[in-house]
Image: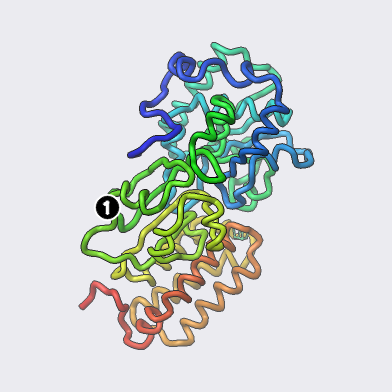
Amino acid sequence: MKKYVLHSESVINNIQTYRDYFGDYLHAKISNYDNIINELKECPIFTRDIYQKPIYDIIVSEKNDEDTLIINGYSIDYLIFKDKFLLKNNPYLILDSAIFLSKILNIKNIDIILRSYYLEEKNILIKALVETEDIYYIDREISINVYDENSYYDNYKEKIIIPYLENKKYIFDLETITQFGYFAHIGKNNFEKYGKGEFKGSVLLSISGDINIPNLYEFELSTSFSDIIRIAGNIPKDCDIKCVFTNGFLNPPIDMESLSNISLDYNDFENLNLKLGNGGICFIRENRCVIRVVLKIVLFAKSIACGKCMPCGFGFNLCEYYLNKIILGKSDYSDFNDLKNILNMIIKCASCFYIRALVNCILQTIEKFNYEFIYAVEKKITLYSFIK
Ligand code: SF4
């Protein structure tokens, strides 16, 4: 992390430090929920997931029979690396905000789900949970559970897969829950000091690819991308950027000029038919083979497809097959057409919004860089190949 806005410079690793920074826990500090709900309406905070919904809409929407609030530290997004940071930087804020939100929603059970390999972060979170229980009295009616995929399955007999997550109503990613926590602690008036445009607060960007200092950065909403690129060390001197993937490969690729002309602002993204979403930004240099980039996205999609529906469950294997054929110089036009047909079929039939967005990104990338595919099919070597 190279820059901080709301998040603290140093790790908050004990309850006393948390109290020094934040004072009382939210549920002890704020008793009038209507005020905070109204303030959220005036100063919306959007979820950082595929839906990009205002928290306000989730809170005021008709209650269904879900009795659990899920805090999602089980990020499936490609090249997004913020969950570990958030868990380590301030686990108390995650707990504080989750408890407060569960009170507002009148939900008695909080499940925090993590990756099984987040061992260190899981221990940090459990330590924070124990300290929180020791120091503040938490209504015994609320239970808080920390799961990884194995213990979650043992308890609920459910796998943490995309369709399962997409069908949950009360599910918040870690960044959304911490933004909500800052908002509730510092109040609307102070929160509005972060960001000059219509939307306020900060965004964590996972900046990767062909940029000098790939890292996790926090920026105020409305920061211009020309500033963001400069702070991330600029593009390497010897390269041009062919395209940029935003929203962790859930948006179609855009060119560098379009990105440089906008700000970190929901309206700016909307005007380009994009979502800010999870804040994943990946720069791709001109002489990087786009067919190999597409193959990587396909392999990622294959790794998260749960197999419940045929086109998605099997389609990515076929895409991998055709892409490898193209890269190896063993393909013809029918392979290229089959590749596109399969992707179109997945978009039509996949039941998950996330998969459809990912495949749309792949298809639009193929369309934008059609010439690289045609070149590879005709010349039997990729345009940007390391093989001479
Ligand atoms: S689209 Fe179907 S196979 Fe793919 S992740 Fe969703 S439910 Fe599973």
Q: Residue at x 73, y 34 (%)?
A: 67
Taking depth in this image into account, of 49 and 179 the one nearest to the observer is 179
Which x, y percent locates residue 99?
62, 25
Q: Residue at x 59, y 44 (%)?
A: 46
Instruction: Kindly indicate the quadrant of the structure image that contains residue 226.
Output: bottom left
Q: Is residue 369 above or below residue 331?
A: above
Disc 1: which residue: 212
Drawn side of residue 239 relative to residue 225, left or right: left
Q: Where is the C terminus found, in terms of image quarters?
A: bottom left
Q: Where is the N terminus found, in terms of image quarters?
A: top left
| Mark 1 residue element | loop
Q: Residue at x 34, y 56 (%)?
A: 209
Q: Is residue 198 above or below residue 248?
A: above
Which x, y percent locates residue 285?
31, 65
Q: Is residue 148 above or below residue 263?
A: above
Q: Residue at x 52, y 42 (%)?
A: 74
Q: Mark 1: is the Cβ under 8 angstroms from ligand 1?
A: no
Drawn side of residue 147 relative to residue 245, left or right: right
Q: What colour scheme has been applied to the protein in the rendered image?
A: rainbow
Quick check: which quadrant has ligand 1?
A: bottom right
Q: Does residue 78 appear in the picture of this structure? A: yes
Which x, y percent locates residue 376?
35, 82
User: What type is the residue that disc 1 sits on?
Assistant: Asn
